[in-house]
Structure formats: structure tokens, C-alpha cells
Amino acid sequence: MNKFGVVVFPGSNCDQDMVYVLETIMQQKVVKLWHKDHDLQGCDFIVLPGGFSYGDYLRSGAIARFSPIMQEVVSFANKGGNVLGVCNGFQILAEAGLVPGALLHNDSRKFICKNVHLKSQTSNSLITSQIDPNAVLKIPIAHGEGKYFASNDIIKSLNDNDQVLFRYCDENGNITPESNPNGAMENIAGVCNAGRNVFGMMPHPERAADGELSNIDGRVLFESILALTV
């Protein structure tokens, strides 16, 4: 059994959803890590959940990146520890430089909350190892700043090094401009770092992991994590 740590920032609103899925659905040990603490409590895997840390002032994730707990998260990641950031957590990872690129305002300049479709782009990552590359996953998004952006050199490096985790697609698996909900470069919905131990994604797999919600497409991400870490 793994011990997962879910970081709670002021403004986090998906922390309990993540705790529920990891603890109740996946039967793992979970602790909440307060943003002011410096102790990761011996966790094997750290999760930065979605929400509006510090009210999304300045830029989403820009203030949370300086929380005391992030000093420990950065150190943990730099030593090879596994870290997943979802939505606002992805934004925080980008602000902290733990994953390449940035998350900009959606092209529509509107907050978008809806189901989208994704395809895994690699099986060579901890969170995608069990996903059929031909499978189309229906996963919710809920963000105002989810447009993935990076320089052309970084995009080329991500593609060359197999660091793109997910791309937005239509229900048939076609990666098209029309299936891109926020204007993300190359329909990118998630990436990992070069060390392949830090993972960021905008869609919320924890919101698609419980049968009570009539959608368990997101559960395969958690199954992938456990398949390689238990």
C-alpha cells in the first residue's frame, strides 16, 4: 500500500475529491498536507489538487508556488519522488518549474466546466501505463486558465522525449482543432517532466473515478499508478 499526500492550499476545492478516490475507491493510505507545513509525513506520492489556490490572484498557481510546503515538494520531486498536479495543481507545477510550459487564459476568456475527451499519448509514464493508446477517455475539465503554452523548442522537446501525456480529442479519438476546449498548443492536456516523475494535467480524473457518477474513465490513471508502485 502506498501513502499519498494531498496538499491543501487556501482555495483548494478538489482536495477531498482526490482523498476520497485514493482512500475509498483505490484503498490507499492518504494524508492531507497543509500548505504552511514543511513535513511530507513520509508520503510516497504527492498530489496537488484542483481549486483556486490563493484566489488565483496574480496568476493561477503563482502564489501557491511559494507556499512553505512547496519547498518540500520541489525537493521531493528533484530527488525522484512522484508528484501529480491536477488543474490548479498543474498550474502550480508549471509556476514552480517542475514541468515545462505555462497555462494561459482559455482562448474564450471564459471559465469552462464540461466533459471533454482525451487520448493518452504515451504508455511510458506512471499515470498512463495501463491506458489503451486507442482508448478515448471522457474526463471533466473546470478551468479558466488551461491553455497549455510553451516555446516551439519546448514543444519539439516534449514530442521528441515522449513527454506529452494526453491530448484533447473528439469522441472518436480524432485530435482536431474543434476538440480543443481552451486553445492549448497541439491539443496538449497533460505533460510530464524529463525525469518522468512529475505529472501535470488539466482534466480531473478524480471526478470520473466513482461508479456513482456514471463515469469511471478516470480510474485507469489511478490504476496505472498503483500497478507500478504497489
Image (tube, helix red, strand yellow):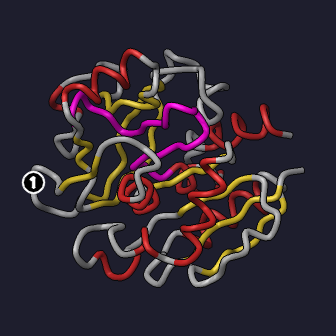
Residue 193 in magenta stretch? yes
Residue 53 in magenta stretch? no
- What is the quadrant of residue 38 in the picture? bottom right
In terms of depth relative to the viewer, which is nearer, 189 or 24?
Answer: 189
- Find numbered disc 1 in the image and state the secondary structure of the residue it sits on: loop
Image location (x, y in percent) of residue 209: 62, 50
Image location (x, y in percent) of residue 63: 36, 75
Q: Residues within 10 Å of mark 1 (few under 14, many from 20)?
A: few
Image location (x, y in percent) of residue 115: 36, 48
Image location (x, y in percent) of residue 182: 20, 46
- The residue positioned 51% from the left and 20% from the top of the image is 122
- The residue positioned 71% from the left and 39% from the top of the image is 225
Q: Which residue is mark 1?
A: 108
- The residue positioned 48% from the left and 54% from the top of the image is 86
In the figure, is residue 60 to the left or right of 92?
Answer: left
Residue 24 visible (yes or no): no
- The residue positioned 61% from the left and 39% from the top of the image is 197
In the figure, is residue 17 to the left or right of 154?
Answer: right
| 172 up-or-down from 142: above or below | above
| 134 up-or-down from 119: above or below | above
Q: Which residues are magenta?
A: 185-204
Q: Residue furthest right?
A: 1
Q: Amino acid at mark 1?
A: Ser
In the figure, is residue 152 to the left or right of 23?
Answer: left
Q: How many marks?
A: 1
In what quadrant of the picture does the C terminus appear? Answer: top right
| 121 up-or-down from 79: above or below | above
In terms of depth relative to the viewer, which is nearer, 152 or 27?
Answer: 152
Q: Residue furthest left?
A: 108
